[in-house]
Image (tube, rainbow, N blue to C red):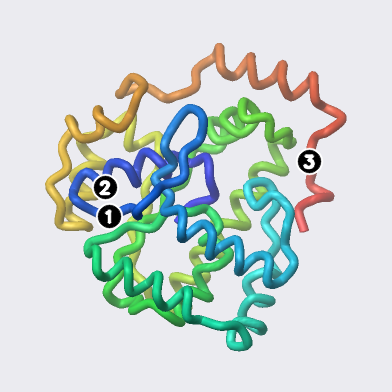
């Protein structure tokens, strides 16, 4: 579970090295593999389309969407969703990763045995997150970005609390700056044997340091100022 641009691709790729199935095809961007099961993303898009949400889920968190899906979900043909869950079970163990899950997971709860699933929740240090988003040309004020991430985290925690689900919180910067400690926690939670070498095979940058330093911050600020008139600010956070 994640808000996106929080290191979830690295975490998912890492877990996949323990034999977790990510799908027949995964969604790839120009510079990296997201490890997102393409069929999962297609079905999540269907759920969002069902209630008419077509905005950028990576920048706007609409609290009404999950409730709207819940009101309509029993009126649609559930066969594709049930068949997908069955396909995943045929490929046990499996791992799902798609930021849209922070909106659609309450719907998926109908078709999943939640007690048999172990949830990972990855977040990011606020400044590092804002830099990454800005470098990806998501132009937001710092306060808007913080509010967006807070809304996502509260929604995910509400889902965990509703179903009394155990989860492992992971801060992305801890994974790359203090990898041994985080790997130990991850292995204990998932009963895996992931090593530093596994992380090095997935993480393309330098371990033991944050991804973004002063140079990245300056670049992000220049991008932000250049596109200042396009920025999202707190009035958008609804």
**Based on the displayed image, in which of its 4 quarters is residue 129 positioned?**
top right
Picture coordinates of residue 189, whole percent (x, y): 22, 57
Q: Nearer the viewer, residue 225 or 42?
A: 42
Is 184 placed left or right of 73 in the picture? left
Of labels 3 and 1, the one closer to you: 1
Whole-percent x and y of residue 98?
48, 54
Considering only vertical position in the picture, is 71 above or below 216?
A: below
- Of all residues, the one furthest to the right in this rendering is 229
- Mark nearest the camera among 3 and 2 is 2
Residue 16 bears which disc, if any? Answer: 2
Q: Which class describes the residues within 10 Å of circle 2: few (<14), some (14-19), or many (20+)?
A: some
Element on which disc 1 rests: loop
Q: Nearer the viewer, residue 78 or 5?
A: 78
* Residue at the spot 50% in from the left edge and 69% down from the top edge: 105
Residue 37 lies left or right of residue 42; in this view the side is: left
Marks 1/2 in contact by CB < 8 Å: the verdict is: yes
Q: Residue 232 shows which numbered tag?
A: 3
Mark closest to the chain's N terminus, 1 or 2: 2
Q: Residue at x 49, y 65 (%)?
A: 157
Q: Earlier in the sequence, mark 3 or mark 2?
A: 2
| Spot occupied by residue 2 in the image (x, y as percentages of width and height) | 48, 52
Question: Residue tagged by mark 1?
Answer: 21
Q: Is residue 117 above or below residue 1?
A: below
Q: Residues within 10 Å of mark 1 (few under 14, many from 20)?
A: many
Helix, strand or loop at mark 2: helix
């Amino acid at each position: 579970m994640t808000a996106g641009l929080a290191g979830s691709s690295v975490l998912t790729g890492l877990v996949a090295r323990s034999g977790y199935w990510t799908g027949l095809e995964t969604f790839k961007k120009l510079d990296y593999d997201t490890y997102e099961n393409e069929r999962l993303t297609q079905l999540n898009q269907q759920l969002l389309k069902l209630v008419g949400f077509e905005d950028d889920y990576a920048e706007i968190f609409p609290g009404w969407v999950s409730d709207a899906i819940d009101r309509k979900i029993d009126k649609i043909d559930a066969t594709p969703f049930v068949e997908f869950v069955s396909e995943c079970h045929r490929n046990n163990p499996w791992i799902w990763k798609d930021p849209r899950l922070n909106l659609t997971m309450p719907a998926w709860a109908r078709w999943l045995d939640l007690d048999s699933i172990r949830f990972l929740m990855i977040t990011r240090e606020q400044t590092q997150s804002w830099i990454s988003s800005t470098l990806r040309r998501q132009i937001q004020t710092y306060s808007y970005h913080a509010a967006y991430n807070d809304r996502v985290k509260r929604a995910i925690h509400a889902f965990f609390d509703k179903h009394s689900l155990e989860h492992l919180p992971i801060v992305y910067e801890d994974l790359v700056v203090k990898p041994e400690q985080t790997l130990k926690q991850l292995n204990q939670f998932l009963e895996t044997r992931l090593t530093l070498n596994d992380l090095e095979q997935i993480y393309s940058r330098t371990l033991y340091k944050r991804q973004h330093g002063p140079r990245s911050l300056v670049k992000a600020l220049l991008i932000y100022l250049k596109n200042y008139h396009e920025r999202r600010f707190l009035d958008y956070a609804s």
